[in-house]
Image (tube, coloured by chain):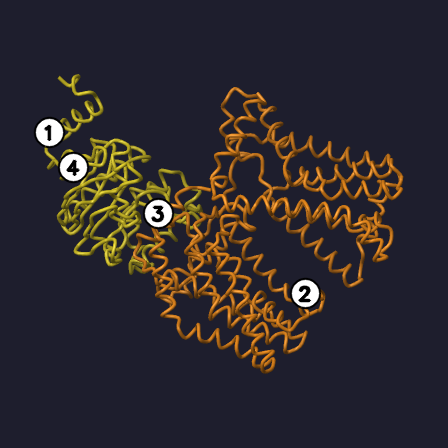
Chain colours: A yellow, B orange
C-alpha cells in the first residue's frame, strides 16, 4: 500500500529523517514509536504531503504523493488541532468532512451513533464550537472524523495522548476492529508502548530519524521495547 | 519587581515574530512613523495659521468645536487596535507576585502606549503657537492639561469597554448620526460640546474636572481588573453558545456549496472576519466622496472608474486579499483532505463574485447621482469580477501571515501583508483600469472608456480556466512554504 523510498528530510545541516526503504502492506496496522525528535511527526507529515522531502519518494497505493493529489480520496488523518476547524460545532465538522468525502448528512447521522461510547456524551449536542472544547474532546472529534468516508489509509499521530482512561480503552477497541478489517491500513504513532503493542501487528522504532527496529508484534515485543528505550541515550559502556 | 516586568517586556519585544520580519519592511515602517510624526507636528504648528487665513474664526474655538469628533475617532481607533493588558497576565498568576502589582503594572503599561503620547505631536506645538500668538498662558496650559487628561480617559474607557461590542457599536452609530446631522445642518452636537472645551481655556480651574474623571476611571479600571483576575472571570475567553446550522439550500452547488457554507460560518462566527465584512460594507459609501464633488482632486473623469472599482470591490479588497490566510488555523486539514486545489480556489472565487454582485446591487442608490455614476460602478464591478478577483487570489499565494480569527487586532493593515509582491499586484488592480478608461476617454469618447474597461473584464472572465490553472500552479509551488509559515503564530 505504502512504499517509502530513500526518504530524507534535512533542515539546514540537520537530517531529521532518513529512511532507505520501508513498505507497509495493505491492511496492516502499523505502529511507530520513538522518543521526542525521532521523526515520527515528520514522517506522517511527509505521508500527507504537508512537507516536502529533501530526497526520495513516498508512493501511496501507486500514487506518487508529492506529484499527484490522487491519494487524497482514500487517505485520511488526524495529526493535531490544525486539522480541526475551530468555529464549527462537532456535528458541522463531521458533515463538512463527510461532504468532502462523498457522504451526505444521513450517512453521517447513521455513522455517529457507532461512536457514542467513545464520545462519552461530551461531543454531540453540546452547543459548543470546537475551539471551546477541551483538548481531549477535540482529539475525539478529530479521530472520529478521520474514520469518515471509508478511507483505506488512516494516519493518527499520538491518538492516545490527552485522552482519559475510559476513552483510551474504547479507542483501542475501535483501532483493533479497524485492524481486523484487511481493507484498511492504519498508521499510528505513540509514546505509550503498552497501547501500541496491543493494537499494532507491526512496530517500527525510529531513533534520530532512522529506523532501528522493525518488529512483528508478539508477546515479547513489549519487553523488548522497554529494554530498548531504557537504555536509549546511555553511553555504550554502561550497557554491559 | 518592576525590574523583572521590564526585562520581560524588553525580551518579548525583541523576540517577537514581527520584529524579525525583514529589514526592508522595518525601514519602511520607521519612515512611515517619522512621516506621521512630521505630519502631526506640521498640523500642530500650521493649524492655527490655516484656520486664521481661511477665516473660519478663532483657531482655538474651531479646534474645540471639532474636538468631540477627534476624541471619538481616537476611541474608535483604540478599540480596534490597542492591545489589552490582560493578555499576558496568565503566567504571572501563580507566581509569588501580588495581584495589585500585576494589575497596576498592566494598566500602567497601557498609559505609556503610543496611542496616548502620539497626540502630543499635535497638541503641544498647537499650544506653543497659541502662547506665541498671545493667548492667556494659564488658560492655554489648563486647556492643554485638560485635553491630555481626556485622552488618557479614552485609554481607560477603552480598557473598560473592551470586548463589549454592543456598547461600542451603539456609541459609534450615535456619533455617525450626529456627524451626518451636522453635515446636513439638521442638528449640531458641537454647539453643546464646544463650550465645554472652551471652558477649559476660559476658566482654567475647570481643567481639574477631566483629571478627576481620569482618576475615577483609572481607579474603576483597577478595581475591575483586580476583582476579575480569575481564570474563569475576567481572564476567561468569551464562549458563545453554538448552534448547528445546515444551509441546506447551498447543497445544490455540490462541493462548491460545502465550501461556501463553511465560508459563511467563518464570516459569521469570528470577530476578525466580521470586522472585515463590516469594513467592506463601508467601502460602498466611499464613492460619495467622488460623486458629490466633495473633494476637488477627485473631479477628473478618470476617478469615476477608481470609485467604481472601490465601491463594488470592498469585499474583494478587505476579505479577498487575505484568502488562504482565513483558513490558516486549519490549513493542514485543507491540504490533506479530499479537496482539489482547484475546487478550493474556485469556491473562494465564487464567494468574491457573489459578494461583488450583491454590493453592486446595494450600491444602486448611486443612481441618485445620475446614470453615469452607477454605470461607473457597474463597469468597476465587471472589472473586479473579470480581472481583480484573479489578482487577489494570485496575491494571496504570497501572503503568508496566519490570521488569528478570534482577535480583531491588526485587522487594519497588517504590516506583513505588505510585501513587495503584493504591492506590485495592487498596480494592475487599481491603476490599469484607470489607464484603460483614460485611453478610451481621451482618444475616442467616455463611452469608449467604459467599453475598454468592460472588455478587459470580459476577456479575463473568458479565460478563467487558463488563469485558474496558472494560479493553481503558483499555490502548489508555494504550498509548503505557506504551511510552514502558518505554523508559526504571529
Within the image, what quadrant is residue B176 found in?
A: bottom right
Instruction: Give the SS element for disc 4.
Output: strand
Residue on which disc 1 sits: A220
Q: CA distance from mark 1 to mark 2?
A: 80 Å
Element under disc 1? loop
Q: Are marks 4 and 1 on the same chain?
A: yes
Whether labels 3 and 2 share one chain: no
Left or right of B65 in this view: A34 = left
Identify the subunit bearing mark 4. Answer: A
Provide the residue designation for mark 2. Answer: B289
Secondary structure beneath label 3: helix
Q: Nearer the viewer, residue B306 or A152?
A: B306
Numbered disc in front, either 1 or 2:
2
> Residue visible at 61% across and 74% down?
B374
Q: How many marks?
A: 4
Residue B189 x/y as whole percent: 79, 53
Left/right placement of residue A138 relative to residue B8 reads left
> Which of the numbered marks, if any, corresponds to residue A83?
3
Q: Mark 3 — on which chain does it sit? A: A
- Cα–Cα span, label 2 and label 4: 69 Å
- Locate residue A208: give its quadrant: top left
Cβ–Cβ below 8 Å for labels 4 and 1?
Answer: no
Q: Residue at x 31, y 55 (%)?
A: A108
In front: label 2 or label 4: 2
Amino acid at each position: 500500500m505504502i512504499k517509502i523510498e530513500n526518504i530524507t528530510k534535512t533542515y539546514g545541516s540537520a537530517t531529521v529523517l532518513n529512511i532507505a526503504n520501508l513498505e507497509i502492506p495493505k491492511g496492516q496496522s502499523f505502529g511507530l514509536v520513538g522518543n521526542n525528535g525521532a521523526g515520527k511527526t515528520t514522517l506522517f507529515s511527509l505521508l500527507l504531503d504537508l512537507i516536502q522531502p529533501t530526497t526520495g519518494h513516498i508512493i501511496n497505493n501507486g500514487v506518487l504523493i508529492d506529484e499527484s493529489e490522487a491519494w487524497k480520496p482514500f487517505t485520511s488523518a488526524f495529526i493535531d488541532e490544525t486539522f480541526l476547524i475551530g468555529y464549527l460545532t462537532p456535528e458541522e465538522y463531521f458533515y463538512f468532512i463527510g461532504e468532502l468525502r462523498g457522504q451526505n448528512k444521513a450517512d453521517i447521522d447513521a455513522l455517529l451513533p457507532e461512536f457514542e461510547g467513545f464520545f462519552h456524551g461530551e461531543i454531540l449536542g453540546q452547543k459548543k464550537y470546537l475551539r471551546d472544547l477541551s483538548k481531549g474532546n477535540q482529539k475525539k472529534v478529530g479521530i472520529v472524523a478521520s474514520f469518515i468516508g471509508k478511507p483505506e489509509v488512516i494516519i493518527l499521530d499520538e491518538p492516545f495522548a490527552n485522552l482519559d482512561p475510559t476513552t483510551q480503552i474504547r479507542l483501542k477497541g475501535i483501532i483493533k476492529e479497524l485492524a481486523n478489517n484487511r481493507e484498511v491500513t492504519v498508521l499510528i504513532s505513540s509514546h505509550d508502548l503498552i497501547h501500541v503493542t496491543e493494537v499494532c501487528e507491526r512496530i517500527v522504532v525510529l531513533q534520530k530519524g532512522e529506523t532501528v527496529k522493525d518488529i512483528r508484534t508478539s508477546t515479547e515485543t513489549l519487553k523488548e521495547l522497554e529494554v530498548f528505550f531504557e537504555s536509549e541515550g546511555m553511553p555504550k559502556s554502561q550497557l554491559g | 519587581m518592576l525590574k523583572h516586568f521590564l526585562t520581560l517586556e524588553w525580551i518579548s519585544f525583541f523576540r517577537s515574530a514581527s520584529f524579525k520580519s525583514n529589514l526592508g519592511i522595518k525601514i519602511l515602517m520607521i519612515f512611515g512613523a517619522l512621516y506621521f510624526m512630521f505630519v502631526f507636528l506640521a498640523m500642530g504648528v500650521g493649524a492655527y495659521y490655516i484656520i486664521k487665513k481661511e477665516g473660519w474664526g478663532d483657531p482655538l474655538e474651531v479646534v474645540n468645536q471639532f474636538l468631540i469628533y477627534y476624541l471619538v475617532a481616537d476611541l474608535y481607533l483604540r478599540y480596534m487596535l490597542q492591545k489589552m493588558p490582560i493578555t499576558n497576565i496568565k503566567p504571572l498568576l501563580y507566581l509569588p507576585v501580588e495581584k495589585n502589582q500585576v494589575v497596576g503594572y498592566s494598566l500602567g503599561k497601557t498609559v505609556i502606549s503610543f496611542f496616548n503620547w502620539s497626540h502630543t505631536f499635535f497638541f503641544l506645538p498647537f499650544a506653543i503657537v497659541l502662547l506665541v500668538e498671545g493667548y492667556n498662558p494659564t488658560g492655554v496650559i489648563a486647556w492643554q492639561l485638560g485635553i491630555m487628561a481626556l485622552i488618557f480617559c479614552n485609554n481607560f474607557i477603552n480598557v473598560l469597554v473592551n470586548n463589549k461590542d454592543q456598547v461600542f457599536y451603539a456609541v459609534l452609530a450615535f456619533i455617525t448620526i450626529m456627524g451626518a446631522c451636522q453635515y446636513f445642518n439638521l442638528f449640531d452636537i458641537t454647539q453643546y460640546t464646544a463650550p465645554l472645551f472652551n471652558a477649559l481655556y476660559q476658566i482654567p480651574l475647570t481643567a481639574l474636572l477631566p483629571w478627576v474623571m481620569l482618576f475615577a476611571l483609572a481607579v474603576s479600571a483597577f478595581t475591575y481588573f483586580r476583582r476579575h483576575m480569575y481564570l474563569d472571570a475576567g481572564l476567561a475567553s468569551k464562549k458563545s453558545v453554538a448552534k448547528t446550522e445546515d444551509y441546506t439550500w447551498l447543497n445544490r452547488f455540490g462541493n462548491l456549496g460545502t465550501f461556501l457554507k463553511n465560508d459563511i460560518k467563518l464570516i459569521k462566527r469570528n470577530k476578525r472576519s466580521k470586522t472585515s465584512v463590516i469594513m467592506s460594507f463601508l467601502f460602498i459609501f466611499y464613492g460619495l466622496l467622488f460623486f458629490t464633488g466633495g473633494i476637488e482632486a477627485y473631479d477628473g473623469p478618470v476617478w469615476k472608474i477608481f470609485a467604481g472599482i472601490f465601491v463594488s470591490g470592498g469585499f474583494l479588497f478587505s476579505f479577498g486579499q487575505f484568502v488562504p490566510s482565513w483558513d490558516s488555523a486549519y490549513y493542514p486539514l485543507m491540504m490533506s483532505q479530499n479537496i482539489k486545489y482547484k475546487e478550493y480556489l474556485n469556491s473562494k472565487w465564487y464567494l468574491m463574485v457573489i459578494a461583488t454582485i450583491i454590493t453592486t446591487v446595494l450600491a444602486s442608490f448611486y443612481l441618485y447621482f445620475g446614470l453615469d455614476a452607477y454605470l461607473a460602478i457597474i463597469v468597476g464591478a465587471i472589472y473586479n469580477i473579470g480581472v481583480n478577483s484573479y489578482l487577489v487570489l494570485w496575491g494571496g499565494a504570497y501572503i503568508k501571515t496566519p490570521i488569528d480569527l478570534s482577535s480583531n487586532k491588526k485587522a487594519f493593515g497588517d504590516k506583513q501583508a505588505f510585501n513587495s509582491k503584493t504591492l506590485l499586484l495592487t498596480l494592475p488592480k487599481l491603476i490599469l483600469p484607470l489607464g484603460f478608461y483614460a485611453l478610451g476617454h481621451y482618444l475616442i469618447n467616455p463611452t469608449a472608456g467604459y467599453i475598454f474597461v468592460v472588455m478587459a473584464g470580459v476577456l479575463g472572465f473568458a479565460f478563467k480556466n487558463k488563469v485558474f490553472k496558472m494560479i493553481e500552479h503558483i499555490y502548489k509551488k508555494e504550498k509548503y512554504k505557506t504551511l510552514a509559515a502558518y505554523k508559526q503564530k504571529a
